[in-house]
Image (tube, helix red, strand yellow):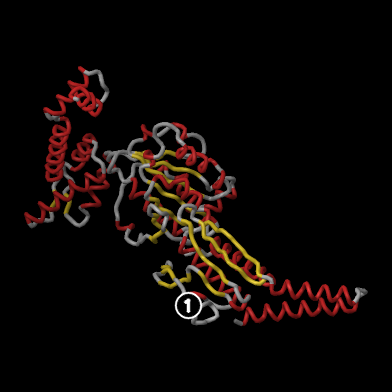
Amino acid sequence: MQELKRRISNYDLAQKEKLVTLGKGSKSYKDILMYLNNEIQMSTKIASFRHAIRCFKNDGVYQLNRAIEQVYGVSAAKAEAGGPSGGNDSPIETIDVILADGTRIKAPYGKIELPELGEEANIEISYDDTTNELYITGKSEYRFSSMIDDIVFETRRLLNTDSVYKDQAIELDSKCSPTIMDLSNIDKEFMVMSSKTEYDLRPLMTRIEKPEKCIERGIPLKTGVLLEGIYGTGKTLLAFKVAQKAIQNGWSFIYLKDPKKLAQTLRLSQTLDNNGHGVIVFLEDVDQVTRGNRDAAMQDILNTLDGGDTKAMNVIALFTTNHIELIDPTFLRGKRIGSVVSMGCLDHDTAMQFVTHTFSDYELEPEGLSAVCDKIAAAGIVPAFMAEITETVKANMIYEDSDVIKAEYIENSLASYLRQVELSKKKEDYETPESQLGKALAVVLKTDTIATTVEHLSDSLT
C-alpha cells in the first residue's frame, strides 16, 4: 500500500499548497468558503469509468493485475479473498493464466473492491469474446480518477511490450482463445524442398531473420505468403518450421484453426505487433474463405489485409491451400499476397535427399539408387506418401533382420504403393447402380442434381 499512501500524501500536500496560495491572495472570505465547499464536495464525489482494450482474455486480465500492482501498490492476483486491500468480505473470482515458462497463476476476474479509493470504489473486469475486448469498468472518488487512468495506460503498455505471448507460438480455437504451442521437436521433423521452393521462400525468411536490414532498405515487413500444392507436399510442416524460426528471431506466431476468424484474428494480432519485430498469422486451407462470390466475410478479409487495422502493423499473413484454382483471383492481387510458394512432388534430387536421410542408419547400396529416384520423380510422389513407402521398406528389413537397403527394395515398395493408388482410383470411379439411376433420371427430368431429381420424384408421387 506504500504507493497508494505516497499518492494520497502528494495529493494532500498539493491541495494544502493551493489553500495556502488561495489564502494569501486577494479573494474574499466568502469566495474562499465557496471554494472550500466545492472542494469538499468534489473530494468525495464518485466518478464512473469505462475502458475497452482489444486483447487476448488471459493476457489482458494478467496485465491488468500487474498494472494494479504497479500503480495501486498491491497485487490482486496474490489475494485469495477480499480485494487488493486484503479484506475478507467476499472471495474474488479468478481465472488461470499460464505463462510462457509454464508457471500457472490465478488472476482476478470480476468485481474487485478498492475501498482506499472511496467508499463505493471498485474495478469490474469482463471480456467480450465477440469483439475480443477487455472491459474495465467501475467507480472511484473523483480525486483518484488519474490513478485509474494510470492503471489502464500501464495495462496497455504491458500488453504492447511484455505480453504473455511475446516471442511465442500460439494456437487459437474457434473463440480465439490462445494456447502456447510446443515446437521443441520440430527440428526433428525432416523435410526436403526443391531449389525453386527454397528460392521462393527467401523474401519471407529475409523478413523473419533480417528485419532491421529490410526496414533500413525500405522493404516493409508486412506481407502475405501463400504456400500452395497438393496434399502431402509439406506445407503445414514448413509453416511450423517457419514458426520456430520466427520465435527464435523475436516474432510472435499465431496458428488460426478457424478460417472464418481470419479478419478478426488479423485485427487481434495488433496486440502482439509491438512485442518484437512483428507477428505471423498462419491459416491452413485459405480457399475455404476466399472462394466463390465476394461476400461480406471475404470483403472483410480483403479490407483487413489491404490496410485499415493492419496498415501500420508488421504482420505476415501465411496461408496454405491444396486448391489454388478455387481462390478468388482478387485475393492474390497486389500486396495482399506478396509471394506464392509452390510445393510439389519429389523430383530426382529431392527424392535422393529423402531416401539418403531416411536410411541414414542403414547400409544403403548405391547401385540402382539413381534409377529408383527417377521412377519416384516420374510417379509424382509427395513427401508424405514417400514416408509411407520407406516405412514399408524398414518394416521388411526388421522382418529379414537386415540393415542393408538395396534399390530394388525401395522400387518394390514403390510399385506396391502405386498399385494401391490405382486400386483406390478404380474404387472412386466406380458408380453404384443407384447413382447411375439417379443420373439417368436427372437427364430425363432435365434437372441439375440428384437432390433435385429426388424432389421431382417426390412431387410426382404425391
Say if residue 196 shows up in the picture: no
* Extreme-right residue of the structure: 26
In this rendering, the answer to whether 74 lies above or below 264 is below
Question: Which residue has dot 1 on it?
Answer: 90
Tell me which corner region of the image, top left, top right, bottom left or bottom right, holds residue 244.
bottom left
Rendered residue at 45%/76% (across/down):
91
Q: Nearer the viewer, residue 354 or 324?
A: 324
Q: Residue 176 location in percent, x, y? A: 42, 54
Q: Residue 53 location in percent, x, y? A: 55, 58
Tally of numbered tags? 1
Which amino acid type is shown beneath numbered disc 1? Ser
In this rendering, the answer to whether 175 lies above or below 260 is below
Q: Is residue 142 left or right of residue 266?
A: right
Tell me which corner region of the image, top left, top right, bottom left or bottom right, holds residue 45.
bottom right
Q: Nearer the viewer, residue 36 or 336?
A: 36
In this rendering, the answer to whether 22 lies above or below 366 is below
The secondary structure type at the circle numbered 1 is loop
